[in-house]
């Protein structure tokens, strides 16, 4: 009987540690998505939200870029702005941070979910992530910059689908290019692009295709590009 006491104590400690670990994991998962309410839409990719603590913040959707409709007017900008207003105004949303906290305009840089995802996969992203919906429906193009590249592969996939189907802004001109609103976190000079075969290639200044390449992602260094799965252009 005396020898059993240490065993019982050890089992009790292990049980307590297990409960603490799983409780911690559950808390981290819930904390990944901050609930907020959209009180105003600025344009297609910028909204003003009210947080649960009562504070109001301006949020810039990351990974994507809609045409301008405020200080400048670009083709399909008004349509993108109206779509976001209809879809989000007055709605409860969930904010997910990638890496960066804010841009130089002091806006929160976030992914917006209309519902908390049960898991991260193609179906959940298509149905619940508003950033992705803007790309899928042709209201936005991809504009992803390190270090906020968590969903870049999904965004690029949806962008190719929208272009191929001539949805939204791509119906105006499938080959159009417009000046993008580049967040302050985009300080890289190396252009990353995914070709029609799905191959990830990066281009450095001075390269044969550098000037003509429309980047889907920017990198600060070649090491960053390589770690993201890109290879250097052969020319």
Image (cartoon, rainbow, N blue to C red):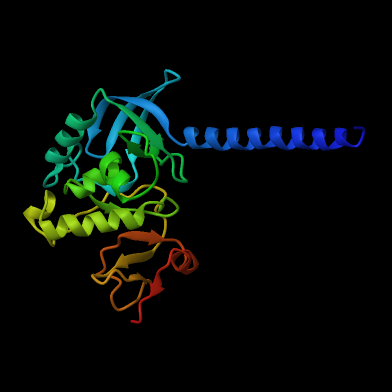
Identify the residue shown where x is 12% and y is 45%. 76
Coordinates of residue 161 in the picture (x, y in percent): 19, 57
- Rendered-image quadrant of the N terminus: top right
Residue 37 visible, this angle: yes
Coordinates of residue 2 in the picture (x, y in percent): 92, 33
Residue found at the far top of this picture:
54
The reply, left or right, for residue 214 in relation to residue 10 is left
The quarter of the picture where residue 44 lies is top left
Residue 176 visible, this angle: no
- Rendered-image quadrant of the C terminus: bottom left
Coordinates of residue 48 in the picture (x, y in percent): 31, 28
Of 170 and 176, which appears nearest the observer? 170
Placement of 141 over or under 222, stated as above or below? above
Of 155 and 169, which appears nearest the observer? 155
Placement of 126 over or under 205, stated as above or below? above
The reply, left or right, for residue 27 in relation to residue 79 is right
The quarter of the picture where residue 113 lies is top left
């Amino acid at each position: 009987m005396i020898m059993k006491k240490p065993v019982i104590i050890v089992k009790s400690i292990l049980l307590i540690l297990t409960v603490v670990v799983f409780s911690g994991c559950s808390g981290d998962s819930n904390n990944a998505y901050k609930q907020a309410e959209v009180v105003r839409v600025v344009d297609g990719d910028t909204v003003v939200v009210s947080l649960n603590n009562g504070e109001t913040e301006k949020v810039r959707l990351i990974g994507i870029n809609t045409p301008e409709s405020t200080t400048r007017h670009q083709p399909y900008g008004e349509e993108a702005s109206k779509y976001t207003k209809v879809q989000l105004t007055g709605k409860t949303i969930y904010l997910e941070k990638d890496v960066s906290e804010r841009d130089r305009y002091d806006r929160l840089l976030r992914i917006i979910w209309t519902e908390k995802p049960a898991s991260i996969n193609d179906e959940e992203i298509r149905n619940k992530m508003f950033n992705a919906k803007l790309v899928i429906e042709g209201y936005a193009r991809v504009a992803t910059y390190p270090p906020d590249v968590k969903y870049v592969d999904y965004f690029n996939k949806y962008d190719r689908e929208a272009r191929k189907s001539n949805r939204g802004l791509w119906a105006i001109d499938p080959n159009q290019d417009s000046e993008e609103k580049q967040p302050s976190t985009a300080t890289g000079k190396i252009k990353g692009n995914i070709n029609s075969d799905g191959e990830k290639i990066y281009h450095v200044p001075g390269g044969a295709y550098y000037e003509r390449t429309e980047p889907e992602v920017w990198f600060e260094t070649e090491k960053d590009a390589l770690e993201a799965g890109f290879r250097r252009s052969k020319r």
